[in-house]
């Protein structure tokens, strides 16, 4: 794959969702609709920046991370891949942008990625993950641990 387009117009308060599967436009519309639903106890307005460009077709996690690496405020990116599009609840792949060089040492990095660098989250959970990571209320590893505790390996907000 060549170089991916630069992500522009992404507001720091918007969850970044990248579409990498283009087999089913109806599934994509379902994902978008689910992500735009109000979320949380107080029914917050959904804020999402969508990348829906066939240039991202079948982009790998590493390619996506490289493409968004210049955004220093971005701690997680959500990928609408084949699994997301085909599964009934459309669980997006949440991937931390944390790199080893962002950490004090190997031990710090291992602690922060103890449950992996990725997990799945249903659309209703995307906002909770993004908002909490953005304000430093919770860490990626906490959401990854909760997803790991789920029988299907998916983060689902309470």
Image (cartoon, helix red, strand yellow):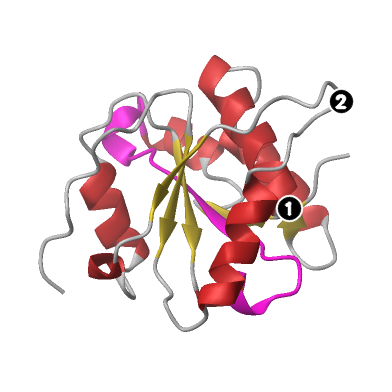
Instruction: Give the vertical position of 79 relative to 82 (above or below).
Output: above
Q: Nearer the viewer, residue 142 or 82?
A: 82
- In the rendered view, does 84 fall on the left or right side of 68? right
The answer to whether residue 83 is above or below residue 65 is below
Q: Position of residue 63 (x, y in %)?
A: 25, 60
Query: Is 91 covered by the magenta stretch?
Result: yes
In the visual, does 158 lie left or right of 80? right
* Crowd band around label 1 with a 10 angstrom C-alpha radius: few (<14), some (14–19), many (20+): many
- For the point 69% across and 33% down, the residue is 128
- Quadrant showing the C terminus: top right
Query: In the image, 147: left or right of 54?
Result: right
- Residue 85 is marked as none
Asked if the magenta segment contains residue 6, the reply would be no
Residue at coordinates 17% horizontally, 46% vertically from top-left?
Answer: 6
Residue 53 occupies which quadrant of the picture?
bottom left
> Which segment did they paint magenta?
84-105
Residue 133 image-quadrant placement:
top right
* Residue 78 percent across, percent down from the top left: 49, 50
Residue found at x 48% / y 23%: 13
In the image, which disc is placed on residue 147? 1
**Residue 40 image point, x, y percent:** 80, 30
Give the CA distance from mark 1 to mark 2. Answer: 20 Å
**Mark number, residue 41:** 2
Quarter placement of the N terminus: bottom left
Q: Is residue 96 above or below residue 134?
A: below
Task: Say if mark 1 contacts mark 2, CB within 8 Å.
Answer: no
> Which is nearer the eye, 44 or 133?
44
């Amino acid at each position: 794959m060549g170089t991916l387009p630069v992500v522009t117009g992404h507001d720091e308060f918007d969850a970044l969702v990248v579409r990498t599967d283009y087999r089913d436009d109806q599934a994509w519309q379902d994902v978008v609709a689910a992500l735009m639903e109000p979320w949380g106890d107080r029914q917050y307005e959904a804020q999402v920046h969508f990348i829906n460009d066939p240039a991202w077709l079948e982009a790998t996690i590493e390619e996506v991370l490289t493409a968004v690496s210049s955004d220093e405020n971005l701690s997680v990116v959500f990928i609408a891949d084949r699994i997301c599009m085909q599964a009934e609840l459309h669980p997006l792949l949440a991937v931390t942008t944390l790199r080893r060089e962002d950490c004090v040492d190997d031990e710090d990095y291992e602690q922060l990625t103890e449950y992996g660098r990725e997990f799945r989250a249903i659309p209703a959970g995307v906002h909770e993950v993004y908002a909490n990571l953005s304000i430093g209320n919770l860490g990626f590893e906490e959401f990854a641990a909760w997803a790991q505790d789920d029988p299907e390996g998916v983060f689902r907000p309470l």
